[in-house]
Structures are given as structure tokens and as C-alpha cells.
Image (cartoon, rainbow, N blue to C red):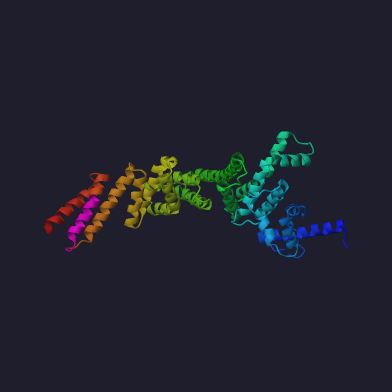
């Protein structure tokens, strides 16, 4: 028979295997032959802490026998449930390890780890006692506070490191880091976590997000400055703007990246316009279509974005001039005017497009339905006159309608 010490050791080894299996199931990593455990042996202390309750003991015993349903439920239980600081600490480390190993789209493991750390920060005596025991008096109080903060923010700091390392190459891991950091910003923390602590975690997530994206923007800014001095001129600038559009999409439509692209595209667009390089300007408009469309929505809905209304309107005007389909061109011009009703270019281009539509209406008109067609054309011309009085094309069309009306009379 096994003695007490031997049985305790056996149970500890069994717990290590049980937790290792639970970890691998969550991370989708099957154990290869002779592969070392992914978790350190001390991680099995999590099961010892769970065993402090009757439900936990039962779940651990069943897990040793191969039935992990109850254990899984306990591991994934809401952190709203009252838990001891030691158990919270073990759960924080376990879920943090899962989040680091499974670089998938689900932010839940990382958020569970964050929740546990946030709750632990509200139990400051536990973390301070632990830090003092580890430091052994080698650190000042300020240094201990810094060490505790670093440990508590570890899940967020890791995601920030992944984002910073891969933002330039648009890696999958960096994108996961970005999504997880943003998830912290909208996450509902446990009720026991103070507002101050919630804000602290959210601010750090936002800081790391902004730092990484701003670093990538700084690279684009440097490249655009080099492109402006490039003999190829607007063509070199267009290449940088195409990369900005890709970064915008990859970043999940970051507003500051959109502003960079729009502000730089304005100068490039006018250079192409003045050079009458219509195909290149049309290509630029298509490259930035999503950026412009999203910016138009934001300017319409967010008063803080109103200063950029004229900028977005001009990009829509470029699109209205370069478009292939009259209906879509009018839609873009109308949208530009909605954003900025005093925009000179939007008014004159929309007036001209309405005159073009009136021309199409008249060209398709036969004897039958002539009166109705004339009425439709006159409405377009009246609107064109309102937008830009005296447009030569409108004056010419009114004379044509007068002649047609005289014939019909």
C-alpha cells in the first residue's frame, strides 16, 4: 500500500497530467510522443485550490478518472463567483497561458486572465505579500508596486508585444493581439472590480494599441515624405497610399489611419487632376473607396469629425468625376454635398452631372411620353441652377427644351 506521502505525490502527478490535458484541449495542441509538458509542474496547484470545495474535489476526482466535464465547468466559471486570492492567481496564470498558446480569434481566455488579475488587484494584500516574499526585501515599496502592476497587466502587455512585433508585416498574431486589446476596451469587468481598476486596464490596452498603430503610421509618413521627393511623383505616393489602405483594413478601420490616407491623398489627387491623368486618379479613388466611405459615415454621425467634412467631400467629388456609371457618380456628388453643403466643387460637379442626366433623358425621348420626359429633365435643370447658376450646359439644355416644347405644341 502507498503511504500518505506517496499517495499525495501520486495525486500531484495525476493533477499535472489532468491540467496538461485540459490545457491542450483549450489550445488545440495534441501532445507528441516524448514531448515535454507545456505547463510547469507548479501549475497543478490550481487543482489543489479547486479541491478546497466539495464540488471542486468531486470535479478533480472525476477528471482523474477521465471525465473532465465538471472540471471544465469550474475552470470556465464566471469570475463573478467568490474565489480565494490563491485560486484567482492560479486561474489568471492558467488562462493567460492558454491565451498565449492559442493565438485564435476568441479573446475569452485572455479576458478571463485579465478579470482574475483585476480582482487580485482589488485584493492588494495578497499580491503585496507575495511580492514581498519573492523580493525578500530587495525592492523598495515603489519598486514592489511597479512589479505588481507589471504582473497584473501581463496579459495585456503580451498582446501589446505581439501587436508591436507584427503590425508592419500585418501578421495574424499581431491582428489577434489588436482584436484582444480592443476587446479589453469594451469588456464588462466583474462587479467586484473598482471603476478605477477597470479604467487602468482599459487605458493600458488603448495605449498599447495606439502606440503600435502610430508606429506603423510614422513609417508610412516617412515613406510618403520620400515619395514626394521621388522623380515618379504621384505614382510613388499612390504606392504608399495603397499600403495605407491595406493597413486601414487590417487595423479594423482605425480613424487615424483613415485621416492620414485622406490628407495625403488630397494632394496626390490634385496633382493627378492637374496633370489630366484620369486613369491614375480613378485608380486612386478605387484604392481608397472603403476609407472614404467609412469616413463619410463617421463625419455624418460624429460631431468631432466635422472638421474633416470638406476633405472627405473632395474625395467623393473626385470619385464622382472619375466614375463610369452616371447614377453612382450622382450619388457620390450628392453625398459630398450632404457632408459639406458649401463645397464649391461638389456643387458645380453635381450641377453638371444633373445636366448630363437631363441630356440623357432628352436623348431617350420620343413623341410618346415627351411631356413627362421634359418635366423630369426640367427638374434636374432647376436643381442644377440652384446649385450653380448660369452653367453653360444648363443654359444650352433649356434652349433645347424650349425648341422641343415648341415642336410638341
The majority secondary structure of the magenta stretch comes to: helix
Is 350 positioned to the left or the right of 85 in the image?
Answer: left
Q: Quadrant of the N terminus?
A: bottom right
Q: Which residue is pictured at 53% across the width and 53% down the height? A: 250
> Do we see residue 285 in this rendering?
yes
Residue 168 visible in the snapshot: no
Q: In the rendered image, which quarter is residue 44 located in?
A: bottom right
Residue shown at the point (49%, 46%) measured from the top left: 255
- Residue with the most extreme left position: 409
Q: Position of residue 309 (x, y in %)?
A: 40, 43
Q: Is residue 373 magenta?
A: yes
94 left or right, relative to 398: right
The residue located at (50%, 46%) in the rendering is 257
State the image coordinates of residue 35 (x, y, percent, origin top left). Answer: 75, 62
Magenta region: 367-381
Give the total number of marks visible in the rendering.
Answer: 0
Instruction: Where is residue 88? Give x, y as percent.
Output: 69, 48
**Pick the front one: 83 or 364:** 83
Amino acid at each position: 500500500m502507498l503511504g500518505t506521502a506517496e499517495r499525495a505525490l501520486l495525486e500531484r502527478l495525476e493533477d499535472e497530467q489532468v491540467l496538461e490535458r485540459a490545457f491542450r484541449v483549450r489550445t488545440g495542441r495534441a501532445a507528441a510522443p516524448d514531448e515535454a509538458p507545456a505547463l510547469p509542474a507548479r501549475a497543478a496547484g490550481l487543482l489543489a485550490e479547486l479541491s478546497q470545495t466539495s464540488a471542486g474535489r468531486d470535479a478533480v476526482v472525476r477528471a482523474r478518472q477521465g471525465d473532465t466535464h465538471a472540471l471544465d465547468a469550474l475552470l470556465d466559471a464566471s469570475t463573478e463567483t467568490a474565489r480565494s486570492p490563491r485560486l484567482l492567481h492560479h486561474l489568471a496564470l492558467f488562462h493567460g497561458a492558454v491565451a498565449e498558446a492559442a493565438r485564435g480569434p476568441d479573446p475569452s481566455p485572455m479576458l478571463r486572465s485579465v478579470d482574475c488579475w483585476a480582482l487580485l488587484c482589488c485584493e492588494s494584500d495578497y499580491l503585496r505579500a507575495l511580492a514581498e516574499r519573492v523580493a525578500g526585501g530587495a525592492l523598495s515599496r515603489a519598486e514592489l508596486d511597479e512589479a505588481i502592476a507589471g504582473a497584473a497587466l501581463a496579459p495585456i502587455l503580451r498582446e501589446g508585444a505581439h501587436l508591436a512585433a507584427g503590425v508592419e508585416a500585418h501578421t495574424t498574431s499581431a491582428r489577434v493581439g489588436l482584436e484582444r486589446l480592443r476587446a479589453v476596451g469594451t469588456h464588462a469587468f466583474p462587479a467586484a472590480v473598482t471603476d478605477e481598476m477597470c479604467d487602468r486596464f482599459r487605458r493600458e490596452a488603448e495605449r498599447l494599441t495606439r502606440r503600435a498603430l502610430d508606429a506603423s503610421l510614422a513609417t508610412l509618413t516617412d515613406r510618403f515624405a520620400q515619395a514626394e521627393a521621388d522623380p515618379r511623383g504621384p505614382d510613388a505616393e499612390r504606392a504608399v497610399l495603397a499600403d495605407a489602405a491595406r493597413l486601414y483594413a487590417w487595423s479594423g478601420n482605425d480613424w487615424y489611419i483613415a485621416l492620414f490616407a485622406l490628407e495625403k491623398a488630397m494632394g496626390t489627387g490634385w496633382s493627378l487632376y492637374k496633370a489630366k491623368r484620369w486613369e491614375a486618379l480613378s485608380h486612386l479613388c478605387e484604392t481608397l473607396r472603403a476609407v472614404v466611405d467609412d469616413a463619410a459615415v463617421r463625419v455624418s454621425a460624429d460631431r468631432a469629425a466635422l472638421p474633416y467634412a470638406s476633405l472627405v467631400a473632395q474625395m467623393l467629388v473626385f470619385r464622382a468625376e472619375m466614375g463610369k456609371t452616371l447614377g453612382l457618380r450622382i450619388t457620390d456628388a450628392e453625398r459630398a454635398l450632404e457632408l459639406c453643403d458649401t463645397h464649391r466643387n461638389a456643387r458645380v460637379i453635381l450641377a453638371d452631372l444633373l445636366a448630363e442626366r437631363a441630356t440623357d433623358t432628352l436623348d431617350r425621348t420620343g413623341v410618346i411620353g415627351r411631356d413627362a420626359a421634359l418635366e423630369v429633365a426640367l427638374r434636374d435643370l432647376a436643381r442644377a441652377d440652384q446649385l450653380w447658376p448660369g452653367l453653360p450646359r444648363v443654359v444650352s439644355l433649356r434652349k433645347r427644351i424650349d425648341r422641343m416644347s415648341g415642336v410638341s405644341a
